[in-house]
Image: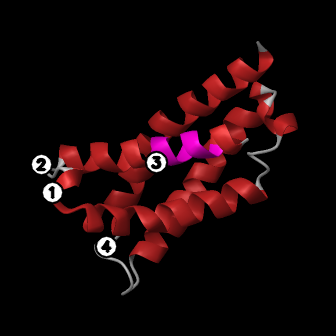
Amino acid sequence: MAAVLAGDLVVLFAFVATGQYAHSYYFWQDLAHTVLITIPFVLAWLSLASLARLFDPDTLGTYRLTIPLVAGTWIGASLLGGFIRSTALFPGDAPPMFLLANIGFGMLFFVPWRAFVTWRLRH
């Protein structure tokens, strides 16, 4: 499960870096800023993924459980992460269009990754 956790963090970082790139910003230009905008979503994802048992081998062993749980958990993590990011503790904001894009594009990163994890555990 440590590898799944590490993979989740890599996927989340790739998602944030891709979003920054789409806005002509490169994560290495200001690593502190990149870390600060990533932290709310890491906290939200790790909290909700743990609650949803997304690190449990029984959950990960079946697509029927994994795919809908990952999708639902990412929606919750996007909203919670956006709320955390909207506080004075972190840079940026989370307007509704940002949250919708975050949910949609985040699914493109997390669902295939976790489907791969399930496939790997089954084979």
Q: Which residue, given by chain and number where applicable, does mark 3 sit on?
A: 12
Position in image of residue 30 (x %, y %): 19, 62
Position in image of residue 65 (x %, y %): 79, 35
Q: Which residue, given by chain and number where applicable, does mark 4 sit on?
A: 93
User: Magenta includes 110?
Assistant: no
Mark 3: secondary structure: helix
Direction top: furthest residue: 123
| 3D distance between C-alphas at marks 1 and 2 | 11 Å
Direction right: furthest residue: 58
Mark closer to the chain start, 3 or 4: 3
Residue visible at 12% across and 48% down in the picture: 24
Q: Is residue 110 visible?
A: yes
Give the number of the mark in front: 3 or 1: 1
Mark 3 belongs to which amino acid? Leu
Q: Which residues are magenta?
A: 5-12
Give the number of the mark in front: 2 or 4: 2
Mark 2 belongs to which amino acid? Ser
